[in-house]
Amino acid sequence: MALYLLYESASGYGLFLAHGIDEIGQNTEAVRNSVTDLNRFGKVVKLAAFNPFESALDALNQQNAVSEGQMTDELRDFLELSLPKVKEGKKPKFSLGVQDAKLGSHIYEDTKIPCQCNEFVSELIRGVRLHFDRFIDNLKPGDLEKAQLGLGHSYSRAKVKFNVNRVDNMVIQAIFLLDTLDKDVNSFSMRVREWYSWHFPELVKIVNDNYLYAKLAKFIEDKSELSEDKLEGLIEILGDEDKAKEVIEAAKASMGQDLSPIDLINVKMFAQRVMDLAEYRKKLYDYLVAKMSDIAPNLAALIGEVVGARLISHAGSLTNLAKCPSSTLQILGAEKALFRALKTKGNTPKYGLIFHSSFIGRASAKNKGRMARYLANKCSIASRIDCFAESSTTSFGDKLREQVEERLDFYDKGVAPRKNIEVMKAAMEHAANQGAEMDVDKESSKKSKKKKSKDNDEVKADDKENAAANGDAVEGKSGKKKKKRALEEESKPTENGKENGTNAENGTEKKKKKKSKDVEMEDVAAVSEGKKKKKKKSAE
């Protein structure tokens, strides 16, 4: 039976025919030894057909399909044209060797071409890959490497493409920076306290907050200049009038040493730097909350933004966290304690990073382990929903949080919690209702836009109709004017042929006045003639 080999290169599909398979006896060791020698391997394997890719985009699409185990239309046409045709009702006298078993099964399902994927075929394809540039004619040196490099870059870019709004790497960097800022702000605040305490030691006992202390150090500067005039400023900073008066009284009886103006300037600048760091820390926290609501809304609703971000950061990504079982998620962050316990055969830890959740703190000492296991179970469900759900919603996170609350009541008071299937049904219904509301809002917005566009179209149509009607009226008037002008030109004698053609209406009015005057003169003449006849008759 003849054996054909399918090789997917960066430049196209190659089909090779393996000779002398019976002589080799499908000895894998013999093929492995002959792979490096082109003279020996060239006697066994010959190029049967080659189908180059049309473009780099076509190569990327073909490789994407092959990597997923799918056969494209181009590959089907290439195999049907290149392989021997099989008569109906007879078994084929050849087989096709492929590198991927999934691709081979798909080829067999669509084309009924028998495929095989084993170690022997893999060694033959390895030899084809090694000497591929020698089998193809008119292939310049370096062309294959360029094609491989370009396809590798495009394939990697296609695989790395992601949704910008769901980049968990930003959450990982933000939580790392947040932890670093917490340490830096604390250490810098302690340095401000120590530095300014040489000048005003009593202020440390009055103000405990680091941010307020730095703000007061910048505001007060020299304690000797602190008086009742600065009381309003102290009240605005502290928010308490009694504390502000206490600061003023302490400054009057302070035991601290005086500082030079240069030292006070440096203390003031350092206090301002600490304040800026504290304010940036607040902004970074708000940014982390916003990103967690986009990336893992259910996990954030269940366990909180900071703890959820720490879990994602420790796992490496949201996908890795979703792959973790709940038992692994429970002790995530306590790996040292776990391996130490395994090494010493002691008790393994009950919780890791989820210990920072408020649920573990609210549970009693004997129920902390059980609460940690239950909470890890719900966190695992929430992370999988966030990772693989198409739409973003907090319905599942809110319902899972209700379940954890009910479990706490069960441990403390013995109140039976709801079953998980009931809670999940309620969460799915709530999510469906939210999706329907979103669709209704979108449709209403679309309808309003359509109405506005229709109204605009109607207004435009009315304007056009009015314009057309006005145009017809103008044309009618102009036509009448032309007729009147023609009549005037015919009626008037040649001697009085010069007229003002621009004002046709005035001409027509004058003509009417002349006609009326002539008629009146004729009537007067007729009346006078009638009177004369009557006088003659009376005289006779």
Image: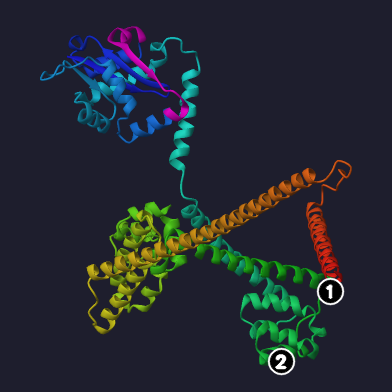
> On the rendered structure, is 513 left or right of 210?
right
Look at mark 2 in the image and give the residue it sits on. 245
Which residue range is magenta in the image?
Answer: 38-58
**Residue 348 found in image quarter:** bottom left
Is label 2 in a helix, a strand or a loop? Answer: helix
Q: Quadrant of the N terminus?
A: top left
Residue 412, x across and y down, in percent: 28, 82
Q: Which tag is nearer the camera, tag 2 or tag 1?
A: 2
Residue 302, x across and y down, in percent: 38, 68
What amino acid does circle 2 point to?
A: Lys
Look at mark 1 in the image and give the residue it sits on. 260
Q: Residues within 10 Å of mark 2 (few under 14, many from 20)?
A: some
Q: Residue at x 38, y 15 (%)?
A: 131
Residue 370, x across and y down, in percent: 28, 71
**Residue 327 found in image quarter:** bottom left
Gap between marks 2 and 1 measured at Cα: 25 Å
Q: Quadrant of the C terminus?
A: bottom right
Compare marks 2 and 1 and give the one earlier in the sequence. Answer: 2
> Does residue 256 appear anywhere in the picture?
yes
Give the camera-side residue of 185 and 446: 446
> Does residue 197 appear anywhere in the picture?
no
> On the rendered structure, is 435 left or right of 4?
right
The residue positioned farthest toward the front in the image shown:
540
Q: Residue at x 44, y 34 (%)?
A: 155
Is 51 within the magenta?
yes
Residue 400, x across and y down, in percent: 32, 69
What amino acid does circle 1 point to?
A: Ser
Q: Is residue 237 above or below residue 116?
A: below
Is label 1 in a helix, a strand or a loop? Answer: loop
